Image (cartoon, rainbow, N blue to C red):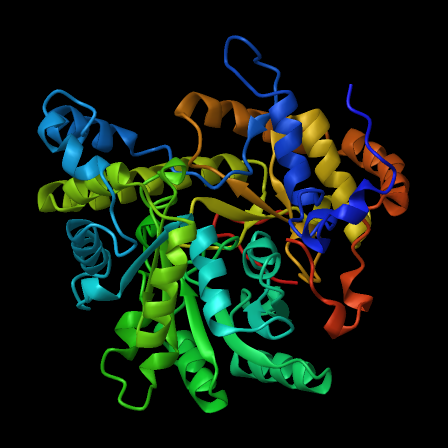
Amino acid sequence: MVLVSSNANNLLSKLAKGNGHGEDSPYFDGWKAYDTDPFHPIMNPRGVIQMGLAENQLSFEFVEDWIKNNPQASICSVEGLDEFKDIAIFQDYHGLPEFRNAWRILWGKVRGDRVKFDPDRVVMSGGATGAHETVAFCLADPGEAFLVPVPYYPGFDRDLRWRTGVKIVPVVCNSSNNFKLTREALETAYEKAQESNIKIKGLLITNPSNPLGTVCDRQTLETAVAFINQKKIHLVCDEIYAATVFTEPGFISISEVIENDTKCDKNLIHVVYSLSKDMGFPGFRVGIIYSYNDAVVNCARKMSSFGLVSSQTQHLIASMLSDDEFVESFLVGSAKKLAARHRNFTRGLAQVGIGYLRGSGGLFLWMDLRHLLTEKTLEAEMALWRVIINDVKAECVAGVVFPLLGSPGWFRVCFANMDDNTMEISITRIRNFVLQNKEVTTKIKKQKFCWRQSSLELRLSSRRLEDIMSPHSPLPQSPMLRATT
């Protein structure tokens, strides 16, 4: 056993001693609950079902078939051995030319070939996490901030803030208009930041939205472009769910919006992408930055030395994405599978009257359980979440972890990270949970007082703006579900 001095922490940096990563937040608590008691249909049928991880496991058959038919794409196969040496030796941080060109092709197809991309502007990174941090380093100094519409992905607090010292200023969007981003909301957030002497360097939007599953229409994107051009700040568009759109309205990329906009300063536009969501490859850690700013491309490429994609992975991905027939069949097939899963999952929710925000993309639903709250507070929401985790044995993400949402009772639930049988079991559990509502309400009342005393208290609405640096229904309604306050 190693004894540690009581002042050993004094020898560490502020970063090492701090908790900026946010691992102790409720967002990660759900993952920990799943990790300690994971569901397995045979080995642990009463375990927790993972419904909090946004992962696409529905389309692996397309990828597996391609790999079987193209064994030479892997340098670790007999068929690909001839290229082993050339791929295994040193590669600089520009990335393999065929890798960057394959991205150009994929991005064009996802966007209906309405936009042309330059492979020389493609910068690789270790997943979207690394890409966002790199962009933040390039655009802002410590203490400066990005506007981010709420609700937003809790990981942004880690990705943008933890090591960069950059702040996040929330743009408040409301359920009354389906959380649509408006010019008024942008102006309000910008003005409050100025009043607090916070310098805004950019606006970050996620399209399609995580956690909402909605897409930005052209008008919203044009509003964002006009706003950042007027304020002379940057616009970062996270488009990592672009190919998960499975129905109308379709996906519109920011690149398409600015294509013929002569008034837009394209030096202010930057796009983040990865293969983690669209193709279900989070383990490959493949992230991309596409910037219209030469200086950002130059700096980001140098910084990518700290999080490169392995040349072996680049080679495999380049071979796969250069196959036009595969890419087209994958995009069509994946959309069909996502649409079918979404239809089956929401049908199960509708049977017990659970509402959700209508969306056309993403790997999740923004589920409305406001009617199950004993009171309209964050404490009641967390009490309900703990019942869902401990009794229903379903790991979803409570709305409280999405900073400054201001409307308790919304939950993000993922539907594409499990097989059909597991989905049916999860729906059965949720259905039984709703039908036993009286018993649930009693348990919630007992738990909400414990929650008030916990270290996870998040009364964000009462905090001053300059302190907002967070770490990271059986209603009688029709299946045409709604989202109103």
Q: Is residue 191 left or right of residue 205?
A: right
In percent of width and height, residue 283 lies at: 40, 36
Residue at the spot 15% in from the left edge and 24% down from the top edge:
68
Farthest-out residue, top: 42
Horizontal and vertical percent position of residue 54: 47, 41
- The one of 58 and 148 positioned closer to us in this rendering: 148
Q: Does the rendering let one see residue 19? A: yes
**Res. 474 visible in picture:** no
Q: Position of residue 359 (x, y in %)?
A: 44, 55
Query: Residue 73's spot in the image, x, y percent?
Result: 15, 33
Q: Residue at x 25, y 66 (%)?
A: 121
Is residue 209 rendered to the left or right of residue 188? left
The front one of 73 and 273 is: 73
Is 18 located above or below residue 191 in the figure?
above
Q: Does residue 298 lie above or below 192 as drawn?
A: above
Q: Is residue 174 above or below residue 29?
A: below
User: Image quadrant for the N terminus?
Assistant: top right
Give the quadrant of the C terminus.
bottom right
